[in-house]
Amino acid sequence: MTTATWLMLLLLGLIWGGSFFFARVAIPYVPPFTLVFLRLSIAALALHLYLRGNLDIYRHLAANWRSFLLLGLINNAVPHTLIFLGQTHIGAGLASILNATTPVWTVIIANRLTDDEKLTGTKLAGCLTGLLGTIVLIGPSALSTSSIPLWAVCLPILAAISYGFAGIYGKRFKGIPAPVTATGQLTASSIIMLPASLLIDHPWNLAMPPVGALAAIVALALISTAFGYILFFRIMARAGATNTSLVTLLVPPSAILLGALFLNERLHATDIAGMTLIGLGLVILDGRLIARRPAFGTTAK
């Protein structure tokens, strides 16, 4: 990836790490399925208003509505639902670790289904190093599963696999402008999540959330979702599915750093060690720094 693409990936990791702030404020007042629907639908509406019919959006939506429906299903509706259901029995730390397996699954799936993203030792080593960093970052206590049912642990892993397939499938939208792809996906996933919200959460019985929670929902939709997915699909078009999936390694350290900066949460030695390992994994995957090093017994030119 180019330096500009790496910067976009880091920005996306920061934005999606920040979504934990917004969700933390909103979730006590809005149940999961309804929160997901609001997040997706507000983001979709905002992007429709932003585009105002430009970039041939409606032609693209009409021509590719089945593809957008499938992308919205496997990149939003299914993984979001699986993660929320898993989190009814597991903590956020373990869920973050399991979600950070996404690059590993993406590498494996891409090796099987694509011709241009084959598995290499460097890719696997970088992904596994980053995953180890995530485990260190979250802490060993998150891995204590003695009282956790197996199905709750499996659901976030299935979500990570779904994200892997979505990354590969998303490559087919390379010729469509990123804002259009983001709008199509979010519109489709909103349609999918609407009946789930109505049937499971019965939102008409909910009390009106306070102003702070409403603001968090809007920020979650506009910043972490609408703008976030525009970045996501731009990175996808430039760097492919495997590189784009690396953002899941950046989300936990971003959330922890934001907590230290804005919530006065303390950084511990394990936080620094985990972030270092994640950074090392990304350096391995980038390859440029390693490629510049001369081989043993030779002189750099």
Image: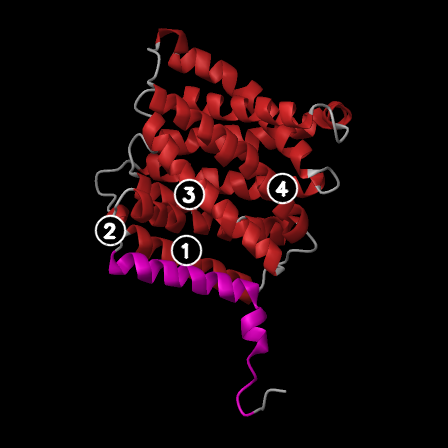
Q: x, y (%) of residue 192?
A: 55, 20
Question: Which of marks 3 and 1 precedes in the sequence?
Answer: 3
Name the residue: 67% across, 38% down.
178
Of badges 1 and 4, nearer the viewer stands 4
Label 2 or label 3, whichever comes before in sequence order = 3
Q: Magenta stretch?
A: 268-297
Where disc 1 sits, the SS reads helix
State which mark lies toward you, 1 or 3: 3
The amino acid type found where label 3 is placed reads: Gly
Q: Amino acid at mark 4?
A: Phe
> In the visual, does 63 lie left or right of 29?
right
Which label sits in the foreground, 1 or 2?
Answer: 2
- Which circle marks residue 131 in the picture? 1
Which numbered disc, 4 or 3, marks the residue that appears first in the sequence? 3
User: Visible in this render: residue 30?
Assistant: no
On whether residue 290 falls in the magenta region, the answer is yes
| Three-letter code, disc 2 | Arg
* Disc 2 to disc 4: CB gap under 8 Å: no
State whether residue 124 is above or below residue 223. below
Q: Does any portion of residue 122 appear in the rendered image?
A: yes
Q: Nearer the viewer, residue 99 or 238?
A: 238
The crowding category of the residue bearing disc 4, from other C-alpha atoms within 10 Å (few below 14, some 14 to 19, many at least 20), is many
What's the mark number on residue 17? 3
Residue at 58% of width from left, 91% of height from top?
Answer: 298
Label 2 belongs to which residue?
266
